[in-house]
């Protein structure tokens, strides 16, 4: 019974992890950039949701579109004005650039919000759902459903809309896409902005579940990375699979080895997987 | 303008003067300057080490913090067990080297982003393990070392020369590597790894050698650092900035050059001490700004760039900037700059 409870916890957590990772995976897949800013963007979204709730009383789940759109604009500006200048440069250059941008954003948040941990306490609380002896926290359940819903929306946008097809085309072959009349630089900016949107949305969900501080951004980034590698780049089902796998891994790892080593377990699994199957479990070329 | 760095004899004169200055520095410096000098030498050692794997072989390694922290802990623990400091430093360097070979075998077949993150992760895992082994390492409480039985000034000089030795060894290794078969092979790998395989370079062995070299002096520097400060904790030892700063320094000076990392470390510390020491709250933000400007305007570093061409490429921005300035300062700065540039052009 205990392991069933932990299984459920793991899956709930995993849904959130896929939402954290999906924007990161999109940017990595299409732009071939590791967006170190992703973790900080999640934290920024979470802070926006925190202040919207404590000052204006807007429910964090209802705040998702606003937080997402603000980050969309920020992301578009960053990509169009700064990161587009180094597209196609060696990994070290793009990585160092986003790292530098991240230092700036992190520092600004530290000055603005201080390092205190904050968490939204919903009033009235959503409580627990009891199924026999199993306990399911309802806020986590809602957050997971919303998270998977957001991932599904992104999937639908990439499949059905014109701009989504253009993003996939750029991912598959940048030069051919340019010949077909796709404005590649603009698509880069839209893609990066979409990644930022997902980060902001994930932040709103996180603010209800986890305590937030500028110091937590690296943890989010690390999780996004592990999910991407586990599931494989360029595959939306892969992101969901990777997220749930990581959630289960952390839950059961904590049960067996104690909470001290949960990161180590995740990373050891990651390194093993990278050795034997570097493309991840469901990795492929086109991003769908 | 650029003659200072390009033409060979002038370059060598500058380099020799620069390096000699370090040898004689302790006789003119007070304890504060000596401390900065020691930090600068430590940064040089880290940057020179990163240059082996990141500059010569072109592999974006973020493992510097892992080597540094491991070296610091091994050195610290050995010293607490009664082993004399210099021997503990050597053993720390040796153990970190062995560690790097094992890890290198695992992660060096990865490329690009995958390698970068895999190397970044090593430090995180080590931090967690060391945090968990409380009985040996003190866990999150940190590791304390017995105080050195020396006067303040002697101690400052002792650690200055210890760091100088480590940085000097790294520099000598760089010079030797630059002329060796190994260095040539690494440059081939940096250019095109597949082609390097075709011309008969054993890339696995070469990359492992570079990764190994990039760990030894970092481990030693970590061990010297822990003796110097007398305390280390996992958060400080595996701080991710320890991995990033050497990269920034090397890029600033010029990756793949011999003295670039040292010049880079010097400039970086100069900035650190003069500019953002006064802005403690936004310290890392200014570092970030420096990184962004560096990547956008000087991605190949001082020694690899014709500085004049950078000025010319951004002439319009600079002109606007200098034209706006006089309104606040009351002097015609732009005319002044133009005059200087004309003089330089006439001379060259």
Image (spheres, grey):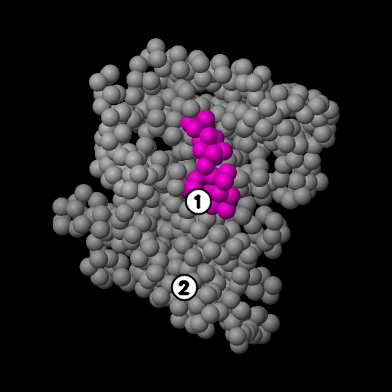
Is B220 above or below relative to A242?
Answer: above
In the rendered view, does B135 fall on the left or right side of B220? right
Give coordinates of residue A32: x percent, y percent: 36, 50
Q: What residue do we see at 27% from left, 36% from top?
A: B335
* Quadrant of the image occupied by residue A128: bottom right
Most foreground residue, B316 or A240: B316
Q: Callout 2: 10 Å neighbours few (<14), some, many (20+)?
A: many
Is B250 above or below relative to B347?
Answer: below
At numbered mark 2, what does the secondary structure look like: helix, strand or loop? helix
The chain holding disc 1 is B
* Quadrant of the image occupied by residue B257: top left
Give coordinates of residue A117: x percent, y percent: 63, 66
In the rendered view, does B28 fall on the left or right side of A58? right
Can residue A77 be seen at all in this image of the molecule? Answer: yes
Residue A147's tag is: 2
For the stretch drawn in magenta, what is the main secondary structure? helix
Bounds of the magenta span?
Answer: B264-288
Q: What residue do we see at 50% from left, 15% from top?
A: B16
Give coordinates of residue A276: x percent, y percent: 49, 46
In the rendered view, does A1 fall on the left or right side of B259? right
Q: Among all residues in the image, which is located at the extreme top?
A: B9
Is A103 above or below relative to B85?
Answer: below
Q: What residue do we see at 51% from left, 16% from top?
A: B17
Q: Callout 1: 10 Å neighbours few (<14), some, many (20+)?
A: many
Q: Which residue is mark 1?
A: B285
- Which one is closest to the eye, mark 1 or mark 2? 1
Q: Quadrant of the N terminus of chain B?
A: top left
Q: Quadrant of the C terminus of chain B?
A: top left
The chain holding disc 2 is A
């Amino acid at each position: 019974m205990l392991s069933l409870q932990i299984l459920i916890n793991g899956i709930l957590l995993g849904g959130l992890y896929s939402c954290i990772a999906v924007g990161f995976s999109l940017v990595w897949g299409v732009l071939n950039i590791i967006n170190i800013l992703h973790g900080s963007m999640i934290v920024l979204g979470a802070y926006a949701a925190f202040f919207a709730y404590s000052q204006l009383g807007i429910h964090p789940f209802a705040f998702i579109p606003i937080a997402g759109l603000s980050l969309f604009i920020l992301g578009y500006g960053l990509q169009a004005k700064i990161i587009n200048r180094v597209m196609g440069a060696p990994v070290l250059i793009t990585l160092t650039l986003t790292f530098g941008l991240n230092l700036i954003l992190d520092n600004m948040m530290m000055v603005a919000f201080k390092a205190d941990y904050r968490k939204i306490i919903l009033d009235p609380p959503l409580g627990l759902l009891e199924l026999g002896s199993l306990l399911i926290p309802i806020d986590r359940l809602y957050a997971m459903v919303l998270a998977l819903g957001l991932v599904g929306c992104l999937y639908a946008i990439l499949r059905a809309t014109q701009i989504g097809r253009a993003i996939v085309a750029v991912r598959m072959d940048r030069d051919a896409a340019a010949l077909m009349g796709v404005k590649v630089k603009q698509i880069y900016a839209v893609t990066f902005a979409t990644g930022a949107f997902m980060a902001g949305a994930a932040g709103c969900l996180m603010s209800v579940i986890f305590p937030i501080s500028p110091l937590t951004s690296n943890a989010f980034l690390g999780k996004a990375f592990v999910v991407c590698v586990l599931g494989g780049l360029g595959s939306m089902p892969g992101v969901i699979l990777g997220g749930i796998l990581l959630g289960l891994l952390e839950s059961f790892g904590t049960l067996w080895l104690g909470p001290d080593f949960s990161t180590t377990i995740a990373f050891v699994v990651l390194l093993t997987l990278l050795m034997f199957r570097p493309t991840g479990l469901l990795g492929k070329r086109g991003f769908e | 303008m650029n003659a200072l760095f390009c033409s060979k004899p002038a370059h060598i004169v500058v380099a020799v003067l620069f390096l000699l200055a370090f040898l004689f520095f302790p006789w003119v410096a007070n304890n504060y300057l000596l401390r900065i000098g020691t930090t600068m030498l430590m940064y040089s050692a880290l940057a020179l080490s990163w240059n082996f794997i990141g500059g010569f072989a072109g592999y974006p390694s973020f493992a510097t913090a892992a080597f540094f922290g491991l070296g610091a802990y091994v050195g610290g623990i050995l010293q607490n067990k009664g082993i004399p400091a210099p021997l503990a430093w050597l053993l720390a360097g040796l153990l970190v080297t062995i560690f790097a070979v094992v890890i290198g075998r695992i992660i060096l077949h990865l490329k690009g982003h995958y390698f970068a993150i895999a190397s970044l992760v090593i430090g995180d895992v080590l931090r967690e393990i060391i945090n968990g082994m409380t009985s040996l390492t003190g866990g999150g409480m940190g590791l304390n070392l017995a105080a050195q039985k020396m006067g303040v000034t002697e101690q400052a000089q002792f650690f200055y020369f210890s760091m100088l030795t480590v940085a000097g060894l790294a520099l000598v290794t760089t010079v030797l590597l630059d002329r060796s078969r190994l260095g040539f092979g690494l440059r081939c790998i940096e250019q095109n790894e597949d082609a390097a395989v075709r011309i008969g370079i054993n890339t696995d062995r070469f990359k492992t050698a570079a990764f190994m070299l990039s760990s030894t002096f970092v481990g030693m520097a970590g061990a010297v650092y822990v003796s110097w400060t007398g305390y280390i904790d996992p958060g400080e030892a595996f701080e991710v900035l320890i991995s990033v700063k050497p990269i920034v320094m090397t890029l600033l000076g010029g990756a793949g050059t011999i003295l670039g990392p040292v010049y880079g470390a010097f400039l970086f510390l100069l900035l650190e001490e003069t500019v953002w020491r006064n802005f403690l709250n936004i310290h890392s933000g200014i570092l970030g700004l420096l990184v962004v400007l560096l990547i956008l305007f000087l991605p190949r570093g001082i020694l690899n760039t014709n500085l004049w061409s950078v000025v010319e490429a951004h002439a319009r921005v600079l002109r606007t900037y200098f034209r706006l300035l006089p309104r606040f300062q009351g002097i015609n700065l732009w005319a002044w700059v133009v005059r200087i540039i004309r003089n330089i052009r006439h001379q060259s």
